[in-house]
Amino acid sequence: MTMEEIDKCSQNDPEIQELRNRIHTGKWEGCNKSYYAVRHELTTFGNMVLRGTRIVMPRPLREQTLKLAHEGHQGIVKTKQRLRQKVWWPNIDREVEGMIRQCHACQVVNKAAQAEPIQPSKLPEGPWEDLAIDLCGPFPSGEYIIVLTDYYSRWPEATVLRSITSQTTINWLNHVFSSHGYPKSITCDNGAQFVSKEFCTYLSDHGIHHRRVTPYWPQANGQVERMNKVFLKLIRASVVEGKDWRKELTNFLLIYRSSPHITTGLSPAEMLFKRQIRTKLPQVGKMSVSQKQLKEAMRHDRAQKQSYKNYADRHRRTQVRDIKPGDKVLVKCEKKNKLSPAFYPTPFKVVKKMGNCLELMRPDGIKFRRNVSHTKLYKGGEGEIGDANLYDLEEDDICDNGEGENIPNHQRENDRPRRNRHPPRWLDDYIT
């Protein structure tokens, strides 16, 4: 942008010409308040108007000026500082802020906004109604621990598996349900064995509601994820002490089930069976649990969850995001290298909002789900429309209206422990 362009544009801009006349005549009645406040700083230079040494840009060139100042995609403060050295016009700061907030490239590469407030789960009305299931592993031996927990009592069921197919999972669930009966619902992640047609049909045939958490948001299944951490700690400790962690797992389940839970104040056994179970520790007195104690445990559960929520929200500086159906959002993408953007470049349309879960639509019409914390409200135009294959969405991301899909199990079945494989040492000096 040259001085000649600015001079010529100022000559044809009615706002600048009116301002020049007011400067020459000294008549400021009915003038724009922003110009009036700095009238003593305004002078003319050819067809242009200056505020001190800064050019008062004519209206047709203001958008171009903003784009030139933001060429390096610097932030709001830096861009304002660049402009303040050379140019000025009324409400320039507000226009800079609006332009940068709507900059497509900046929205894609900038990090997400603050996290959403935590939404504590409500305690079920009774024991063994709502369960959560997950897999922990694989471990160096190629084995897994399959974990099932009761949201009401925190009672855990777990066993070691070498194969984690849908049929293996169903066989183990049948064994557990033979002791405790069928629950009303099971919450799981989007693992292949949990979203297969075989598993979904099994749950449907037994009247169990299948709940799938939002992809890439394990916090939604936090109860069982927490148990996974406990089991991992147990296994590491067993390895350090030179013990067989498989045997220790059985002993640990008894200890955990009989120990008071920090959230309810009662042990999982007391919450599930309304009585204490015998352990190696001596005990005197009644072993049953009254209805009053159960009500107190429920009250304690609510109070503890609210306390955790307040603490987490305060330290994470959470903020509610005003995202509603019809809005366009950017979706967080996997960071593959240092040049990977924070978000996919294509805005996605919000179809439905269910609590903290958003149902989104790609430009090709395919719907998928994400937690609201993995999105950012898009400001501006349509954005860049890319190839749908670039979105890297897994098959289990796609919405299926609650019905499981026949997604192949990519987990390699192996009934034997895996070992580390490497070339023989006599090939170390082999040169290709």
Image (cartoon, rainbow, N blue to C red):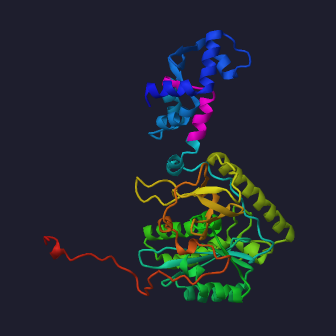
Looking at this view, is 386 or 145 the one in front? Answer: 386
Looking at this view, is 379 or 330 the one in front? Answer: 379
The answer to whether residue 402 shows anywhere in this view is yes
Q: Residue at x 53, y 30 (%)?
A: 80
Name the image quarter holding the N terminus: top left
Looking at this view, is 71 or 35 the one in front? Answer: 35
Q: Quadrant of residue 303?
A: bottom right
Name the image quarter holding the C terminus: bottom left
Q: Residue at x 52, y 48 (%)?
A: 110
Which x, y percent locates residue 354? Answer: 71, 64
Which x, y percent locates residue 64? Answer: 51, 36
Q: Residue at x 81, y 72 (%)?
A: 125
Is the stretch drawn in magenta largely helix, strand or loop? helix
Span shown in magenta: 85-99
Query: Is residue 94 covered in magenta?
Result: yes
Report the side of 222 relative to 306 (left or right).
Answer: left
74, above or below 413, in the image: above
Of all residues, the one furthest to the right in this rendering is 292
Report the number of numbered marks: 0
Q: Quadrant of residue 306?
A: bottom right
Q: Quadrant of residue 121?
A: bottom right
Which x, y percent locates residue 203? Answer: 68, 85
Query: Is residue 100 covered in magenta?
Result: no
